[in-house]
Amino acid sequence: MTVTITLNSIKKVGDKIGNNIGDKPVNTRKHGLNLTIERILSEMRHNPSITKSELVVLIEISDTAIDNNIRYLRNNGYIKRIGENKNGYWEVIKQ
């Protein structure tokens, strides 16, 4: 007895991801910044003494995501920290 099974398509490992990586449009607004970064800038403008913990609660993203976004903003000249971490404040340089 011989059994033949015909498969319509065999996908290679990774085909589910394939070209989808990086294809999602980034939700950007003015100046090419995403909504999360705009919200962080807005919160810093309204409360320059805001802490990372407060941003986590307000924006509802992780500590790591806040750190990454703040690093991006610092590296690209959008914000600057004035003073120490405990007693300092954020200065928004670029609008």
Image (tube, grey):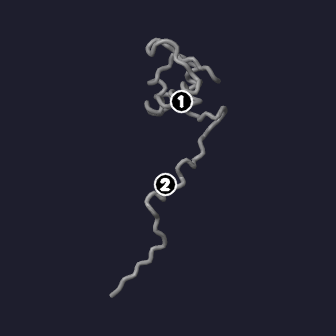
The amino acid at mark 2 is Ile
Residue 92: image x %, image y %? Answer: 59, 20
The residue closer to the viewer here, 19 or 24, is: 19
In the drawing, does residue 58 fall left or right of residue 42?
left
**Residue holding disc 1:** 72
- Tell me: residue 84, above or below residue 60: above
Q: Label 1: few (<14), some or many (≥20) within 10 Å? A: some
Specify which label sits upstream in the sequence, 2 or 1: 2
In space, the residues marked 2 and 1 are separated at their CA atoms by 27 Å
The amino acid at mark 1 is Tyr
Label 1 secondary element: helix
Label 2 secondary element: loop
- Name the residue furthest front: 75
**Residue holding disc 2:** 17
The disc at residue 44 is: none
Q: Residue at x 44, y 32 (%)?
A: 64
Q: Residue at x 63, y 23 (%)?
A: 94
